Structure formats: structure tokens, C-alpha cells
Image (tube, grey):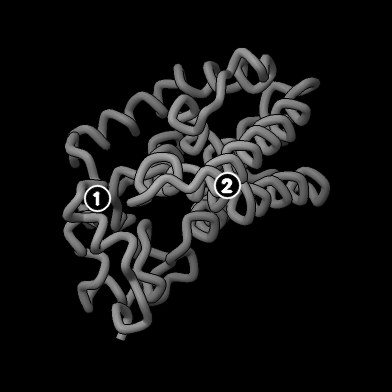
Amino acid sequence: MIELYYWTTPNGHKITMFLEESGTAYTIHPVNIGAGDQFAPDFLRIAPNNRIPAIIDTAPADGGAAISVFESGAILHYLAEKTGKFLPADLRGRTEVMEWLFWQMGGLGPMLGQNHHFSQYAPERLDYAITRYVNETNRLYGVLNQRLADRDFIAGDYSIADMACYPWIVPYERQGQSLEDFPHLKRWFHAIRTRPATLRAYEKAKSVSQTATVTEESKKILFGQTAQHVR
């Protein structure tokens, strides 16, 4: 059983997408990041970076004690190893998937996150920052669009690389992008959006919360963190 510590964010959706695709049994433990649940001592013991998602695997493959994993990319890799699904066994295929998983973790997610922050949530409008991150989002969309020009999915077959990237493209309009400018990405996006497991994962999100995570009150919690919050 996978105990999933989750909130309804792109990084959270990655893990429910995998669990639904693989048919792995799991239980969701909501961590309302807008209310500050991510700073609870019990959560920090398994997620020291005070970010969702995190998991506890109560039945790890080595037969030992339960194991916890934080960071969405590490979780996807762990689950793929555990189940033997969505990560190729051959060296070259596996390397491709891992390249694009790291690309998402190091580029697509952080840059689009900054796009969201400065275009949607910053207390004052900073045109330079908005332009910087909207343009970088556009560049990254272009990289992904080019990658998908001659293949159905990022690394050929559907994999954890696709699951990592897709949730970050869902709010493309808020990121100042049009999928019409990226025809290969658009085709890929719609193919994933209509997968039964994707539909189930996003329905699970609705059952956890349908209210906005970022409010005027929650901004103080989400955007004012310093080292004192993890002591």
C-alpha cells in the first residue's frame, strides 16, 4: 500500500496519474498547503523540504520496514522501479526517460512555477519578471513540441516522463501560452488528457479540494517561508 501525502497541484497530480495508470493501491492523506499543513512535524519527518507530494510505501520490494520518499521525480522513479511499469528496462530507453524526467524537474516545473507566481500571485506587477518567465515558458514549450514531432510520447512509449510534464501544461492559458502554437505538444496533451487514468486522477483531485489553494490569506503561508519554517 502506498500512503500518498498530496495536494491538488501539478506535482501532486503526477503521482495520482502514475498510481491510477499502474493500478497500485493507495490512500490519500490531504496536506492543505494553503493552510500550512506542510509544516506539521509528522509531515516534515517524511518531507524535510516541506513540499508535497511524499509517499510512504508500507510494503517495499526488499521486504523491510516501510520506506518514505519525497520529491515528485524521485517518487515517480521509485514507483516505476517498484512496479516495473512506465520505465524501460533497456539502457537507452531508460536513459531517455530519465533525461526528460530531470528536464521537467530542473526546468519545466520551476520555470512555469515562477511564471505562475509573477503573473498571478505577486503583490505588485513586475513586468520584467513576467516577461522573463512567460518567454522561458514559451521556449520550454518549444523544446517539448520539437521533441514530440516524430514520436507519440516524450520517450517513445508512455512513461513517467510524460506523467511528470503533463500536469504543468494543464494551466497553459494562465501561463500566457496557446497550444495552437505547438501542434505536436497539442496532440500529445490531448492524448494524455483523455486517458482513463488521467481522468480518474483529476477526479480524485476534485474529491480532495475544489477551492483555490492560493488566497490572500494563504499567500502569507506559501510565499513568506524562511529557514524558521523548517526548524
Q: Residue at x 71, y 26 (%)?
A: 145
Q: Tag 1, which secondary structure?
A: strand
Quadrant for the C terminus in the image: bottom left
Quadrant for the N terminus in the image: bottom left
Q: Tag 2, which secondary structure?
A: helix
Question: To which quarter of the image does residue 20 belong?
Answer: top left
* 185 to 30, vertically: above or below: above
Q: Is residue 24 visible?
A: no
Q: Position of residue 136 (x, y in %)?
A: 65, 42
Q: Residue at x 54, y 53 (%)?
A: 110
Q: Residue at x 34, y 64 (%)?
A: 56
Residue type pointed to by label 2: Tyr
Q: Residue at x 26, y 56 (%)?
A: 219
Residue 43 vs residue 196: left or right? left
Q: Earlier in the sequence, mark 1 or mark 2?
A: 1
Residue 63's label in the rendered image is none
As measured in the structure, the alpha-carbon distance from the residue carrying label 1 to the one carrying label 2 is 43 Å
* 156 to 209, vertically: above or below: above
Circle 2 residue: 128
Q: Position of residue 172 (x, y in %)?
A: 49, 28
Q: Nearer the viewer, residue 81 or 123?
A: 123
The mark closer to the camera, 1 or 2, is 2
* 143 to 53, vertically: above or below: above
Q: Position of residue 29 (x, y in %)?
A: 21, 55
Residue type pointed to by label 1: Thr
Q: Position of residue 157 (x, y in %)?
A: 67, 30
Circle 1 residue: 27
Q: Residues within 10 Å of mark 2 (few under 14, many from 20)?
A: few
